[in-house]
Image: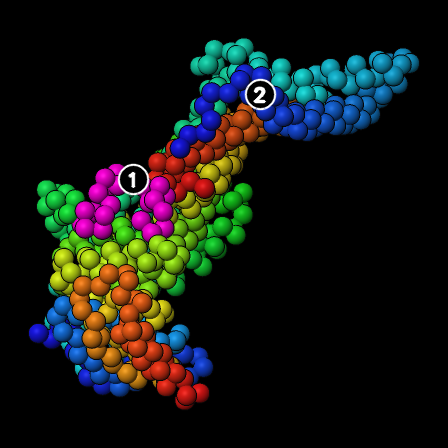
Amino acid sequence: MTEATASPGSTVLGRGLGRALPILTVLLAIIAIWYLAAIWMNATWVRDQAVRADTVLTTGDLIRQTLTLERPVLPAPHQVAAGLWEGIAGQKITSKRSLVWHGWVTLSATLAGFAIGTAAGVLLAVGIVHNRAMDQSVMPWAVASQTVPILAIAPMVIVVFASMGVTGLLPKAMIAAWLSFFPVLVGMVKGLRTPDAMQLDLMHSWNASRVQQFWRLRLPSSLPYLFASLKVAIAAALVGTIVGELPAGATSGLGARLLSGSYYGQTVQIWAALFAAAILAAVLVMLIGALERLTLRRMGLAR
Amino acid sequence: MTVIQARDVSLTFQTADGPVHALKDVSLTIERGDFVSFIGPSGCGKTTFLRAIAALETPTAGKLEVADMTPDQARRQRAYGYVFQAPGLYPWRTIAGNISLPLEIMGFARADRLQRIARVLDLVDLAGFGGKYPWQLSGGMQQRASIARALAFDADILLMDEPFGALDEIVRDRLNEALLDLWKKTGKTIGFVTHSIPEAVYLSTKIVVMSPRPGRITRVIDSPLPRDRPLEIRDTPEFIALAQQVRDGLREGHSYD
């Protein structure tokens, strides 16, 4: 049932290293390329400054200066890491400069939007699977909703809600829900239709009602599909929330942090916020992945 | 007492390539306690006929009665249990949970359910396996569990569509013996679709030989074999003669094409 439990420490370490090595190699390569790009992209500015100050730059000077600029075109990895660390650990978490605080603002709207989007997606899927009229009418609208650029819709949503006196979490959550309902809808329609003809015939032979058929057969069968789409949906919800934080001078959230960074040319701030968002997304997707493994293994559906 | 009565039953599927006559003028009477095998090549309508009895298909002509009702009424009265070729057990339910499923759907009380589960598990020789999950059981055991599931709500009729078709010969022999034993103990009426001549001859009191295009009955053979049948009966001259009759019937059906 479980994997091998007790094995010598050395082999576990060896196997861990064997698995980590390719990942580490790729990571190091990316960082190396990033450093080269930073030097190359910032070099123009550094050279211009040197010409203006009438000084001569050695290659060492050039490299050192390109990697320590206050407002680089492309900040070096260690600058972003420092900015990230400063934003997370260097502030009180109630501070407006704290990435934890901004992250929480974004996270709460993301989770709210994810919940709304998931509920909407599941309900629509149930409708599509059980109702012929919905089967033929809902999907085109759902697809159409996703072809509208979210950047065009987001400001309108914010403005419309604001005109009704609703600001803060809800408008952003609605944009997040707009993006996250779709993968759930598609996944659940597929999932609810996975039971094969034989299983449906069995249900029919027992004279099961559609409600019984739904709870006992269709819903449990759909769970692997649901979890797969939830992973896409939560990442989409985060993107939606951040897009919702961009317009109309929002002052809180990772999106606002991105925007203010770009207003003032604070590239380190932009990248730090970007990485904070990426880390947040990764953690959320991993959490859903863990929940998925746990549930599917308990249900005997794990592959 | 007649349990299943078919009179000139026809069933035509409308397909893109035109109508397919799955059944044409099929008439058959099945008495209570009969073990009836349907045998014939693919496309002879044996499965379709079984499904029509179960109200999973609807005949396009003729009259079909199950326990003096229409098949659909019989289905609503839980007159039959159906066993498919695949066990179709839910992986997220234990064996006991799987057997419990139709009982829950039909609204049996919990205590009654537990009692019934224990009884049918015993009947198919799976006592002690109720707490296991399907993947922990062999294919033969899974199919036995699916038979237990079909027996749990005490339907008088058991319909089996090639239930042992996916199993190997050795397991199949054992399950055939177990099925005969179960039939004797419960006195159920059994409709059994198979591809195998020895299986049909060994199990049945009545062998229905069918042939395709259009699906129809070519021969109904009443078995002279006694109800007590050890596996060795398959080496007796009576058994071999009966198998020969079935083979002749099958060949007859084929002379059309």
| Structure colour scheme | rainbow
Q: Which residue type does callout 1 highlight?
A: Lys
The residue wearing badge 2 is A11
What is the distance, in whole Å, between disc 2 and disc 1 at their CAs?
34 Å
Rendered location of residue A210, percent (x, y): 24, 57
The residue at the point 85 percent across, 21 percent down is A47
Residue B27: quarter of image:
bottom left
The residues colored magenta run B120-141
Q: In this view, does A63 lie above or below A154?
A: above
Q: Nearer the viewer, residue B176 or B240?
A: B240
Q: Residue A256 carries which label?
A: none
Q: Which chain is disc 2 placed on?
A: A
Q: On the rendered structure, is A185 left or right of A126?
A: right
Rendered location of residue B68, percent (x, y): 10, 74
Q: In this view, does B99 lie above or below B157?
A: above
**What SS does tag 2 mark?**
helix
Q: In this view, does B29 lie above or below A208?
A: below
Rendered location of residue B182, percent (x, y): 19, 57
Q: On the rendered structure, is A300 left or right of A206?
A: right
Q: Is residue B131 magenta?
A: yes
Is residue A259 in view? Answer: yes
Is residue A97 in view? Answer: no
The residue wearing badge 1 is B132
**What SS does tag 1 mark?**
loop
Q: Which of A106 and A220 is in front in this view?
A: A220
Q: Which residue type does callout 2 highlight?
A: Thr
Q: On the rendered structure, is A280 left or right of A226?
A: right
